[in-house]
Image (cartoon, rainbow, N blue to C red):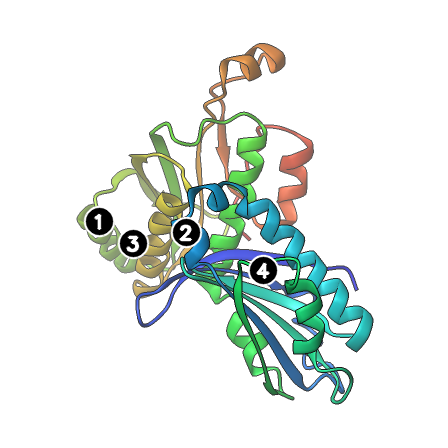
Amino acid sequence: MAKQWDYFNRTTDQKEQMSVLVDAAHAGYAPLPGFTRLLSIVINLYAIATDKKERDSAQAKLGILERRLEHMLAEHTQAIYIGRINTETRLEFYYYAKPGGAPHKKLAERVMALYPNYRWLAAERDDGDWSFYDYLRPNEVEKLYAKNNILLRSLSEKGDRLGIPRHVYHWLRFSTGEELAKAEAGVKRLGYGIVSAGMDADKPSYPHSLIVSKTHPIAIHAMNDSVGELYGLANECGGLYEGWGTDIRRKLWRRIVTSVGGKRIAVAGLAALAVLIAVSLLAFVYA
């Protein structure tokens, strides 16, 4: 089964910031019959965070470590790697395996022997209904964060200077004029300007369209903050949050190579991202 990674940021109820990577390929099939053991390997990142030399090389090292652990557990226990959690102080890898087989701690020791400076621990528990996998899976707004990550990575690869502030436009829809009016008041309180508000017959169930804008960089945290608060406002008012768009700000050499610059791009659902990657500067909206 081909992997389908969702990568997004999450803030826990305890206000801890974490990045989550989870394989969405199992979403329609979980729990897999027989794979009832939840295995975890947790790496303490404190030593990395406080050692500049170690920190500079950590990303490449941890990527290799991740692949080595996945290969070792898959080869000896047929474990399925389902995802990871990354915080400032730890990196957690998670797998599901069938009962029995070699203890995964012993297998992990073979890999971790190559990283003598890393503190780590291994644990396992029964999780036949894959409740932890459900915990890792993104909720509705986190799915938008995952799409933001994909789009911003694509824009960066195309030469966009993500740190440059620019107008960012957002599209919302509502079923009634009363919902629209409530949303207009709400976006103003949040510091957005109203670009347009009116009727749009393209979606009969939500004919009232609202386009708002704010000026800021399109770095991931800024975009997630903006998408999150507007998604929440749209839900509160009974409407839909559809997506966002902006002007591409290319690096000079990219502008020279492509002879394209300053065109507006609107964000799409994942189905349209393949089109974005193949053809630059196409407009689309969240699914």
What type is the residue that disc 4 sits on?
Answer: Pro
* Residue, disc 4: 116
* Residue, disc 3: 180
Give the foreground label among 2 and 3.
2
Q: Which disc, if any, is residue 190? A: 1
Percent of width and height locating residue 258: 61, 15
* Residue, disc 2: 49
Q: CA distance from mark 2 to mark 1?
A: 35 Å
SS at mark 1 in the image: loop
SS at mark 2 in the image: helix
Few, some or many residues within 10 Å of mark 2 (<14, 14–19, 20+): some
Q: Which disc, if any, is residue 162? A: none
On screen, 144 above or below 247? below
Few, some or many residues within 10 Å of mark 4 (<14, 14–19, 20+): few
Q: Earlier in the sequence, mark 2 or mark 3?
A: 2
Q: Is residue 270 visible?
A: yes
